[in-house]
Amino acid sequence: MKIAKAFNTTLNTTAYRQFIREIKERIQSAQLKAAVSVNQELLRLYWDLAERIIARQQASAWGDGILKYHCFIKSEGWKISAKK
């Protein structure tokens, strides 16, 4: 019983609550930085893919046989659907 009471007393101190707040802030900050980093990498990838596709289309007749298809970038990846 004394251990539980001592534990509850420790949890209710201002210093402990501040410590927990700091931990939460650090976790949230790291999560935000990670999300920004991932989004930057995806944008670089999509930009590079578009540049490479355009370069190939301009350099040759590459793509003539695929013009009947539309490519859409969706959150779950590439989706190719036949043009009707």
Image: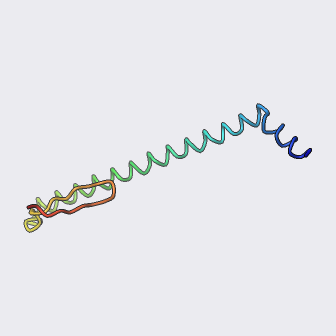
Report the residue that reaches farthest toward the right: 2
Report the residue that reaches farthest toward the bottom: 65
Residue 25, picture quadrant:
top right
Looking at the rendering, in which quadrant would you find the C terminus? Answer: bottom left
Instruction: Judge whether 43 appears above or below 68 on screen.
Output: above
Q: Is residue 69 left or right of residue 8?
A: left
**Where does the image place residue 4, in percent across and percent down from the top left?**
86, 45
Report the residue that reaches farthest toward the front: 1
Q: Residue drawn 9% across and 63% down?
A: 68
Q: Is residue 32 left or right of residue 21?
A: left
In this rendered view, identify the residue nearer to me: 68 or 9.
Answer: 9
Q: Residue drawn 52% across and 46% down?
A: 31
**Where does the image place residue 8, in percent across and percent down from the top left?**
82, 40
In this rendered view, identify the residue nearer to me: 31 or 84.
Answer: 84
**Where does the image place residue 1, in percent across and percent down from the top left?**
90, 46
Q: Is residue 7 left or right of residue 42?
A: right
Q: Residue drawn 77% across and 33% down?
A: 15
Question: Exactly how many numbered labels are in the figure?
Answer: 0
